[in-house]
Amino acid sequence: MCITLAHGVLVAQEQACTLRLSGQVLDDHDRSPLGFAMVRMEPTGRSMETDERGRFGFDSLCPGPYVLHLAHMGCAPVERKVLLRKDEAVLLYMEHHAEMLEQVEVVRKRADEHVGHAREALEGIDMERASGSSITGMLQRIPGVNSLSNGPTIGKPVIHGLSGNRILMLNQGIRQEDQQWGNEHAPLIDPFSTDRITVVKGAASVQYGTDALGGVVVMEPVELPREAGLNGNLAGEAVRNGRGGGLHGMLENAVKAVPGLAWRVQASGRARGDSEAPGYVLSNTGFGEMAASASAGWRNRRLRATAYFSRFQQELGLLKASHIGNITDLRNAINSDEPWYVAPFTYVIDAPKQVVRHDLLKAEAAYRVSELDQLVLTYARQVNNREEFDVRRGGRSSIPVLDLVLVSHTADLVFKHFIGQKVHGRAGISASHQNDRNVPGTGVRPLIPDHARESAGVFVIEHVDLEENLELEVGARAEVDHLQVRRFDLDNNYTTPEHRYLNQALSAGANWALREHLHVRANIASAYRPPNVSELYSEGLHQGSASIEVGNDALKGERSLNGTLDVEGEWLKGRLSATATLYANRIADYTYLRPSGYELTIRGAFPVFRHVATDAWLHGLDIEARFKLAPSWTLRNRTSLVRGRDLLEDEWLFLMPADRTENALVFHKDKCGGWKDLELGATSTFVLEQTRYPAGLDFSPPPEGYHLVGLTANINRPTKHGRLYFGIEAANLLNTAYRDYMDRFRYYTDARGVDLSLRVGYSFGEEP
């Protein structure tokens, strides 16, 4: 593509790549120079140490965006983004021995949390290229993360074989509470509300609860700007499969008249019509969603205060062919190659469907009690409204069959402290209250009863730098949990059962740099997850999953002991890099939905699933490897393997992800005329047939394995005030007909066929 422009590129480089970026790194408290700090520049890969006066400089640079990575002993690492148009001199401020960083422009906190855990992140260009996807769709780009889906519109992340309430979602530093007990309840989070998503694999995060048996997904808050100057971005997407698209915009600024005051607003929307499988339309699978957020903050030397509000609302259709009138037709539909109901493409969303809305209000204040220590107080209120609609007689389809309102309050007080030169940590207390109620008027017995839940906990996490290349972290949490249920039993007697739990979690981890390009992380952790109300008391049709679910009030809750070993290294002078994660998880009273025949109701015939408990053993391996074939060519492999055994029944666990491997060939060219960062990629994904499953349990055997081919192309162009970028992606390019074992709607239909998407965006201001 760029061969015809070769001469022009060389001339442009000779003319333009003469810029210099220099700067000085200072201590934020006393403005003293920080000598011998390491400064690394991306994407050039060049690095240098500051001199004794904290100064550094890079020469022979081309115009465009760069990222400076700063590291200094006793300081948390810092990032700064710079748009270079002419020779620049910048000042960078680092807070010595403190987790709260103070820099002049856009920076990122890099707290050393989750020591010893395997973790992966999506940020920057990777986030841009995944824009238009849901949170779950984005996370599937990370090895070890799968999706538990209900057709093309609903997906929940699966980490190392675990999903649902075992995965903790942190949105803006707050536990996301959005009726996540349902397998068909996708996370109600706008992916545009963050610029970095981190996945921490394995039992983790004693700070936020004891129940993260599978991992933590962190949507990190974006720092508010520090200097006056309007920054923002606008991006759009168009997609072929579903014939829809999306739009996203953001603006931010610091108020020059009020030092320390800054704000940000953001909004996005997406809409699609029916998805299409190879050969037919997946009728009633369109969706529409809108999201918006606003934040403001003020800070001075000792005090920092921020406020944040977001709203996410979504209407999505559910495959009409998943709702069937009688048991005979249901069995025929499961054994059919095509869904029983196929209609022409439309944007109209009819019942069955879901309409959901989630509001998050957060207020936070941090006060520095000394030069090194600070107190952080956080309060959050979340309101979640979920309505589910079914096809009903007598013109009643507009009346929801499920109407739930969940109100959650949380408060946390955290003391961040330092003890000497090598020990620092966090200790705190937290409390929460939830009330989940059914709105009257549905005319249907509630799937789950009204209930209230209160919890209170204490935690402590300490981090020790034993040596320059070895760090340890230990953490503990204790929590009391009270669940009060209000329900009518099957004999229509009003009862108020109560459940009390004492939860504990422990974690110990280590990071060890064996040499410059070989790092080992190890962690062992225990966790406890009390049963949720749906596992205890659900009874009836769960319309979103087109199945009948039956609870079990004898469940005790899950206790796990989890270990992970993560090795990351580079060889062959950096041409080969790889990360491998080994993990094992022993879970007592592992709770899951077990298939249990069919049932005919007034609303149709549906498969039945019962909540049961067993002892489980899960283990597996994640691998990501990159090999540089030539300066512009890279070969990448991502492989995930997971095994799960039911120890009591001595059989394989139900609904474990099949083995998956993805190979990609990537071409990257830094400059192409006036364009930058041209990247072309071809992907080949193999998903093997799941042969490790309990025989005779499921309604149909696992589908055959499949192979998908994809293509991507991305490029951006620096402008006078920002950056313009384009991206094209083709998924399932060969229009392969397949069904995925982790898709609950595989009983009725194939997955989506070929999809083409086009992304265009423009960012301006100081953050290119």
Image (cartoon, rainbow, N blue to C red):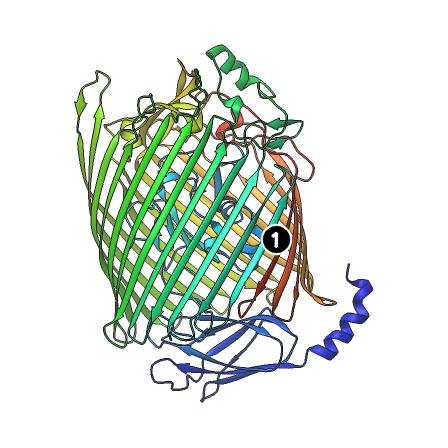
Picture quarter containing residue 339? top right
Q: Amino acid at mark 1?
A: Arg
Relative to 537, say whether 324 is above or below.
above
The structure residue drawn at horizontal position 50% and vertical position 29%, both measured from the top left corner, is: 318
Query: Residue 8, can we see it?
Result: yes
Work out which quarter of the rendered image holds the C terminus and state it. bottom right
Relative to 678, say whether 97 is above or below.
below
Q: How many marks?
A: 1
Q: Is residue 177 left or right of residue 149?
A: left
Residue 408 image offset from top left, x and y in percent: 28, 45
The structure residue drawn at horizontal position 25% and vertical position 31%, both measured from the top left corner, is: 450
Picture quarter containing residue 507? bottom left
Residue 418 image offset from top left, x and y in percent: 26, 71
Work out which quarter of the rendered image holds the N terminus and state it. bottom right
Query: Residue 531, can we see it?
Result: no
Say which residue label 1 marks.
636
The single residue placed furthest to the bottom in the displayed view is: 53
**Nearest the eye: 656 or 544:** 544
Q: Is residue 232 left or right of residue 380?
A: right
The structure residue drawn at horizontal position 58% and vertical position 63%, both measured from the top left corner, is: 763
Residue 427 image offset from top left, x and y in percent: 23, 61
**Neighbourhood count class around disc 1 (C-alpha, 10 Å): few under 14, some 14–19, many 20 upward:** some
**Nearest the eye: 439 or 464:** 439
Q: Is residue 456 left or right of residue 748?
A: left
Residue 73 image offset from top left, x and y in percent: 39, 76
Determine the secondary structure under disc 1: strand
